[in-house]
């Protein structure tokens, strides 16, 4: 793979930042990688793991002369970071992010971006419940979607360069509006996390009553929820605070459907339960048929496609 950017700056070196560093190293996409991390421990770890060539205690130092700047911290931090780095971004540079929400990011970041800098929001639909600089791996983005939500006035050449970057990391790239992204992700990612946090929290309350039986007898279904519910609390707090409208809309729909199931159980409506379960099973089968089952042992083992 060829070098796509001379200098890439990573702002925040956690799961996604470190995975990007690994992917860039593996595919030789960047001449040089710089980083910003707030803690001395993360800065030392990032150098030790070879994730970055140089790492700084301020974002301003990290982004100087960078051709591509990627915000990889929780969504709630982007506005203040953009305000800080906006004045020192290199003219012609691309500023992007990996945040799980897009509308709020545009609102928070855009006001601080000088003319001549290409701000192109992005979101890799790839992750795990792990966090921190040691949790990343180069294959994370392979065969996964990366959604870009460029503004209508975005420079087409810059969008193509960023799309080429994500393809080189192994992803398939899709372009959509921030509003559409937030609505889709509210049901496919945000609500499932809320449900997982809630069911595990309810079970933890019951734990006192059942004295450790929840852990002892946790079967596959509950265990799968605990994996999702082990995701980073700061990241997910910021997701829900910043995608409020779409999540509340989907939560409303979900609650109505849950009430319908509750009613079916109460009144012994087996046909309804059977129909809902049959349709849901079909969704799972479609995901597997589309090759999007990340739990499969073969998922993501292939090499990134060439551009
Ligand atoms: N985890 C996932 O599954 C996933 C998937 C796709 C996108 N995302 C998005 O990627 C971003 C990072 O998530 P992650 O999973 O890598 O989280 P993470 O917790 O592993 O890493 C985030 C890093 O940002 C640092 N950070 C926090 N506040 C900061 C600030 N003000 N300035 C600089 N750094 C700061 C933290 O110390 C941490 O090292 C989030 O915006 C999240 O929405 C996460
Ligand atoms: O696989 C997981 O652990 C994830 O939760 C990844 C996941 C998702 O919901 O699919 C989580 C948040 C993101 O913004 C993108 C991906």
Image (cartoon, grey):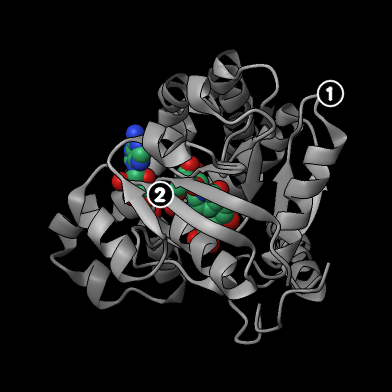
In the picture of the structure, the residue carrying the numbered disc 1 is: 152
Decide if residue 38 is in sight here.
yes
Q: Quadrant of the N terminus?
A: bottom right
Q: Residue, x 55% and y 70% (percent of image)?
A: 25
In this rendering, would 149 be left or right of 188?
Answer: right
Determine the residue located farthest toward the right in the rendered image. 156
Q: Nearer the viewer, mark 2 or mark 1?
A: 2
In this rendering, would 109 be left or right of 213?
Answer: right
Q: In the picture, residue 253 is in which quadrant?
A: top right
Look at the numbered discs 2 and 1 and tell me whether their residues touch, using CB distance below 8 Å. Answer: no
In this rendering, would 132 be left or right of 284?
Answer: left
Check disc 2: other Cα within 10 Å, few if <14, some if 14-19, many if 20+. many
Q: Quadrant of the C terminus?
A: bottom right
Distance Cα–Cα, label 2 vs label 1: 30 Å
In the picture of the structure, the residue carrying the numbered disc 2 is: 35
Q: Is residue 146 above or below residue 107?
A: below
Q: Position of residue 48 (x, y in %)?
A: 29, 69
In this rendering, would 266 be left or right of 287?
Answer: left
Q: Residue, x 26% and y 55% (percent of image)?
A: 42
Which is more N-terminal, label 1 or label 2?
Answer: 2
Q: Residue, x 63% and y 32% (percent of image)?
A: 102
Mark 2 secondary-structure assignment: strand
Q: Is residue 133 above or below residue 232?
A: below
């Amino acid at each position: 793979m060829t070098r796509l950017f001379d200098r890439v700056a990573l702002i925040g070196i956690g799961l996604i930042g470190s995975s990007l560093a690994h992917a860039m190293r593996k595919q030789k996409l960047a001449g040089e990688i710089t980083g910003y991390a707030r803690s001395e421990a993360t800065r030392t770890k990032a150098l030790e793991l070879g994730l970055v060539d140089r790492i700084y205690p301020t974002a301003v130092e990290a982004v100087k002369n960078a051709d591509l700047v990627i915000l990889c911290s929780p969504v709630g931090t982007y506005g203040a970071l953009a305000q800080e780095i906006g004045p020192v971004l290199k003219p012609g540079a691309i500023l992007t992010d990996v945040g799980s929400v897009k509308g709020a990011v545009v609102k928070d970041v855009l006001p601080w971006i000088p003319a001549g800098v290409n701000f192109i929001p992005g979101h890799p639909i790839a992750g795990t419940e792990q966090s921190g600089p040691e949790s990343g791996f180069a294959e994370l983005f392979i065969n996964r979607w990366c959604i870009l939500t460029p503004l209508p006035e975005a420079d087409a050449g810059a969008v193509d360069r960023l799309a080429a970057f994500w393809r080189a990391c192994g992803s398939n790239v899709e372009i959509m509006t921030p509003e559409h992204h937030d609505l889709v992700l509210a049901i496919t990612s945000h609500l499932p996390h809320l449900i997982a946090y809630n069911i595990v929290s309810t079970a933890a309350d019951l734990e006192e009553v059942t004295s450790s039986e929840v852990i002892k007898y946790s079967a596959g279904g509950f265990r799968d929820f605990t994996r999702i519910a082990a995701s980073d609390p700061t990241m997910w707090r910021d997701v829900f605070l910043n995608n409020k409208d779409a999540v509340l809309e989907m939560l409303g729909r979900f609650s109505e459907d849950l009430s319908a199931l509750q009613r079916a159980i109460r009144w012994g409506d087996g046909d309804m339960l059977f129909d809902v379960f049959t349709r849901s099973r079909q969704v799972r089968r479609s995901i597997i048929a589309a090759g999007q089952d990340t739990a499969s042992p073969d998922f993501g083992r292939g090499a990134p496609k060439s551009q």
